[in-house]
Amino acid sequence: MSPSDRTRLEMSAFLSGKRHGLRARLLFVGPAVIASVAYMDPGNYATNIQAGAGYGYALLWVVLLANLIAMLFQGLSARLGIVTGKNLAELCRDHFPRPLVGVMWAVSEVAAMATDLAEFLGGAIGLSLLFELPLIVGMAITAIVTYAILLVQGRGFRPIELIIGTLVGVIGLCYLAEILIAPIDWGAAGLGLVTPAMPDAAALTIAVGIIGATVMPHAIYLHSGLTQSRAEIHSEAERAKVLRFSDIEVVAALAVAGIVNMAMVMMAASAFHSGHSEVSEIETAYHTLTPLLGAAAAGVFLLSLIASGISSSVVGTMAGQMIMQGFLRIRIPIWLRRLVTMLPAFAVVAAGVNATQALVVSQVILSIALPVPMIALIVFAGRRDIMGDYATGPLLRALAIAGAAMVLGLNAVLLAGAFGVDLPFLGPMSLGA
């Protein structure tokens, strides 16, 4: 019996009351952990570094707000898969007009490629800096490692969950080490977490970047697919129990992702805010960390970046595969899917484009694509003919609409700045996340 079959069998035994205990409950952990990788991907590093370097601990409350919005939408996505047995892309295909479905697929496919571009480059940058390799060699190593991990998918859902969970653990441990190495001002950090403040217009620009790029399109699609058939459900009581465990997992996994992002800001605040507030790029942060906090801190920073790049690249490819299969009912070999999402990154580097600038462009593309899954999720989650008694109530629906309005509004601001539209209430526009 494969690990996935054994996990599914043991989950069924727990749901029917034949098994008890913490170990049985841990079998339900997996989908939200995978989705949480989207909130710790290399695209977040530059903005968090910029926030800490430029404004110390003052913008930690923005990271907290962004994380709460992420919890809401990932929870809705997980609920959609558990209740309907279908993922978001499949529901779009079944309920929307065919021309609209084609447009939604095309936009989502481009977004999947843009996502993988940022994540793939992040891992490659980490490898090239840590081992002093050419960036193209770092990319080749990242490609080989991510493809090897993706091959594990053929053995079912559990092995890939354990691998991604391990990489998430590496990222978390790295940032635990960073905040132990860096002299954190915990009083100022606590104040920044609970006191909303916007020091100046440039700080608002960074806040826009943090919140505006919070909810990733591929994470919304993927989470619904990871939960759609993971547990065998035989009654409404069992479904309610699975939903309860899913909600707990979403809160826990996204809380860890939020803590990691806060740790990034705190590390940057401690290391760079006094004397190096201009630091805003990953490469600069690494080179500046070595003389300030020592080689160990710089090495741990790169290790976390490599784990982030590899894990998020794997997750991005999984999401791209699910998007194509859901919208078009087409499943292509994993090596071809990996090649399709990997080629743009190689093309960018071969053309001599600055890696950080490539990350910026990828975020512009994600901002354009985000309304597609976000609005579709709110629509389906609120339809009783699809969700039955699990449709969102007035309060949850209002929170989702408010969260979407905030995120999509800030994404519009990001896009306006990226395309050179003058926004007098913002400082100089800089997309980092």
Image (cartoon, rainbow, N blue to C red):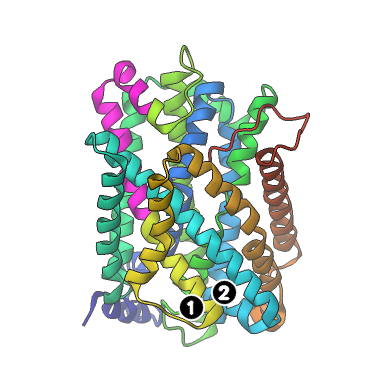
Per the rendered image, the range of residues in magenta is 285-311
Q: Is residue 128 left or right of residue 270?
A: left
At horizontal 26% and vertical 78% (from top left) the residue drawn is 6
Rendered-image quadrant of the N terminus:
bottom left
Q: Secondary structure at mark 1?
A: helix
* Amino acid, disc 2: Ala
Viewer can see residue 133: yes
Circle 2 Cα neighbour tier, 10 Å, few/some/many (<14 / 14–19 / ≥20): many
Marks 1 and 2, how far apart in space? 8 Å
Work out whether residue 230 or residue 104 is closer to the camera in this orientation and state it: 104
The residue mark sitting in front, 1 or 2, is: 1
Q: Which mark is residue 325?
A: 1
Q: Is residue 66 left or right of residue 120?
A: right
Residue placed under numbered mark 2 in the picture: 89
In the image, residue 35 above or below residue 151: above
At horizontal 66% and vertical 27% (from top left) the residue drawn is 428
Work out whether residue 268 or residue 342 is closer to the camera in this orientation and state it: 342
Q: Earlier in the sequence, mark 1 or mark 2?
A: 2
Task: Give the main secondary structure, helix, strand or loop, of the magenta stretch.
Answer: helix
Q: Is residue 190 left or right of residue 103?
A: left
Viewer can see residue 196: no
> Could you tell me if the residues under marks 1 and 2 are in contact, i.e. CB atoms within 8 Å?
yes
In the image, residue 198 above or below residue 76: above
The image shows residue 322 at horizontal and vertical percentages of 47, 72
* Amino acid, disc 1: Gln
